[in-house]
Image (tube, grey):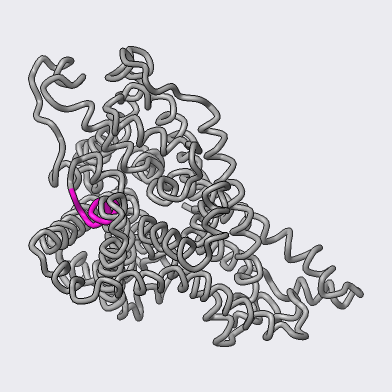
């Protein structure tokens, strides 16, 4: 059944007259809104002249490049090493409480990694709570090793979820056929299962790599200078040209990662070809099914129990910084977070709705282009987007810059640019599941196109709209670099207060906002897991 047969012709959703012209304008506006600020980075970098080449080949710049790429490689490999076995364990192995472990393993994705780093640097060390509780001085967790461990613990769920989805789509008969040909379990997995789920692993690995490359808070808290910190320090030192040049270099590395994932996941023919026997073959662990639960238990303890325990310790017993009382948390910061994230969610839905509807109901290249353009912003690191917006508005549109300094306009715009694709994907998927025969029946009963959409289609896609809005809202709540650089003067949110507390070494002051952020962020996983048909 084609797209049009599933959801009906485009005219069932939108008036056909002038719709192509409307989408041509929309595509142009989106492209300009996304590309113009990023293109301005080229203008800033070009102002360096010959110094640009010298700066790019300087030993300090090359060291940051190597360090950043190495961190991406280590975290991605660690995510695969943890996420794939856990996916196999929760899909194919008959371990007790499998659904419970599935939810628990996915939950670290709801915790911002910089909160995990915040908890780790406080918990470990000779004078940390863990050392005190155990009576043994523990080494501090920081630097490259600390950042790699923390990022791995909070990004592996990307690979876990995508690999799990691939395993649930796998045809068990393929594995069973290999077993009848005297292939052992390991050989059957390597020769049959792994090639089938490789696109899913690659998709999750891409998300891990992009997250690691763009992460700002975790390396900063761990005292590790990577691209994002290097860019931020140059920006703070009023070295705009150098910050722009580094931002372009970071975008180039992002492009290389995207190209690598495309090459790995390109040959996915047959990867999801058969769905007749879902879930692949059951893996009989026998008596080992109970010891096997130690793996998800250890991962959950490190990623969830440790930070929550540290936050609770700060809340109940106090923590570093309480004696100084230089920072005072106000629930106004929480309201600020909710306010800007809610506005961003509503704005994203308003922009995403026509794009998603058109791309789901039309097969034109224009509609496809309009749906793909926003993903440029999604792949752009938050700090790069923030610096691009500051430079563009300051030099090309000073009135917009002043508006951004006095209001949350630039913050909301950055959120929409970065996270709107989440809403587009959710709404588009829901729209494609609507049976076009329902709208055709409404039309035969005398309903106009708009009335048929309002009475039939819209109620059916409301879950997708709500999911998209929730994802944008909750992702915006956790965004650190864009909020930090684009917020108005005197405007604090949960994440910026946590940033201030860390910079001042007053970890105890961050207990309440950290808890609040974890609770609110946890709703994102509730939304995602509620959609899974397990």
Q: Which of these two is toward me, 21 or 368?
A: 21
Q: Which of these two is toward me, 430 or 227?
A: 227
- Is most of the magenta stretch helix, strand or loop? helix
Is residue 196 something that shows in the picture?
Answer: no
Task: Give residue 359's quadrant in the image.
Answer: bottom right
Task: Give residue 120's quadrant in the image.
Answer: top left
Quadrant in the picture for the N terminus? bottom right
State the image coordinates of residue 240 (x, y, percent, origin top left): 32, 61
Up/down of 438 relative to 521, above or below? below
Q: What stretch is highlighted in magenta?
A: 225-232
State the image coordinates of residue 446 (x, y, percent, origin top left): 91, 75
Question: Is 357 on the left-hand or right-hand side of 201?
Answer: right
Question: Is 120 on the left-hand or right-hand side of 139?
Answer: right
Q: Most extreme residue toward the right, as rendered? A: 446
Residue drawn at x 47%, y 31% is 516
Residue drawn at x 10%, y 14% is 135
Up/down of 372 relative to 58, above or below? below
Residue drawn at x 31%, y 30% is 307
- The stretch drawn in magenta includes residue 411: no
State the image coordinates of residue 119 (x, y, percent, origin top left): 27, 31
State the image coordinates of residue 236 (x, y, percent, origin top left): 31, 49
Is residue 27 something that shows in the picture?
Answer: yes
Report the number of numbered marks: 0
Question: Is 341 on the left-hand or right-hand side of 350?
Answer: left
């Amino acid at each position: 059944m084609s797209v049009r047969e599933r959801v009906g012709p485009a005219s069932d959703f939108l008036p056909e007259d002038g719709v192509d012209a409307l989408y041509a304008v929309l595509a142009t506006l989106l492209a300009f809104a996304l590309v113009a600020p990023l293109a301005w980075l080229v203008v800033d970098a070009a102002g360096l002249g010959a110094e640009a080449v010298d700066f790019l080949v300087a030993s300090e710049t090359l060291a940051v490049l190597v360090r950043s790429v190495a961190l991406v490689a280590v975290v991605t490999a660690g995510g695969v090493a943890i996420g794939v076995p856990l996916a196999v364990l929760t899909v194919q192995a008959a371990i007790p409480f499998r659904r419970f472990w599935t939810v628990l393993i996915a939950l670290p994705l709801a915790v911002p990694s910089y909160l995990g780093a915040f908890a780790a640097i406080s918990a470990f060390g000779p004078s940390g709570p863990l050392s005190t509780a155990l009576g043994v001085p523990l080494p501090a967790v920081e630097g490259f090793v600390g950042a790699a461990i923390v990022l791995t613990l909070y990004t592996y769920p990307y690979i876990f979820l995508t690999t799990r989805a691939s395993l649930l789509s796998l045809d068990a008969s393929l594995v069973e056929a290999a077993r009848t040909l005297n292939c052992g379990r390991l050989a059957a997995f390597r020769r049959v299962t792994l090639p089938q789920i490789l696109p899913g692993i690659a998709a999750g690995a891409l998300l891990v790599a992009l997250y690691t490359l763009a992460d700002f808070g975790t390396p900063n808290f761990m005292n590790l200078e990577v691209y994002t910190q290097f860019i931020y320090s140059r920006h703070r030192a009023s070295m705009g040209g150098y910050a722009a040049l580094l931002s372009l270099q970071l975008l180039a590395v992002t492009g290389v990662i995207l190209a690598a994932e495309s090459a790995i996941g390109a040959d996915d023919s047959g990867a999801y070809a058969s769905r007749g026997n879902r879930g692949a073959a059951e893996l009989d662990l026998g008596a080992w099914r109970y010891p096997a639960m130690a793996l998800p238990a250890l991962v959950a303890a490190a990623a969830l129990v440790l930070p929550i325990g540290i936050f609770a310790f700060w809340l109940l017993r106090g923590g570093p910084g309480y004696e100084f009382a230089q920072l005072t948390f106000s629930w106004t910061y929480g309201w600020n977070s909710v306010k800007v994230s809610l506005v961003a969610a509503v704005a994203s839905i308003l922009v995403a709705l026509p794009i998603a509807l058109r791309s789901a109901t039309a097969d034109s290249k224009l509609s496809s282009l309009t749906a793909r353009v926003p993903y440029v912003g999604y792949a752009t690191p938050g700090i790069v987007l923030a610096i691009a917006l500051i430079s563009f508005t300051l030099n090309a549109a000073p009135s917009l810059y002043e508006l951004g300094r006095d209001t949350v306009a630039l913050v909301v715009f950055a959120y929409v640019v970065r996270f709107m694709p989440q809403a587009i994907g959710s709404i588009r998927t829901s729209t494609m599941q609507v049976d076009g025969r329902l709208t055709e029946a409404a039309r035969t009963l005398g309903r106009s196109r708009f009335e048929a959409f309002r009475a039939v289609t819209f109620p059916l896609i409301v879950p997708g709209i709500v999911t998209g809005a929730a994802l944008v809202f909750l992702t915006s709540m956790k965004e650190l670099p864009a909020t930090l650089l684009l917020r108005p003067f005197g405007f604090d949110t949960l994440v910026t207060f946590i940033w201030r507390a860390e910079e001042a070494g007053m970890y105890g002051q961050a207990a309440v906002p950290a808890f609040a952020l974890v609770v609110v962020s946890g709703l994102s996983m509730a939304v995602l897991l509620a959609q899974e048909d397990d």
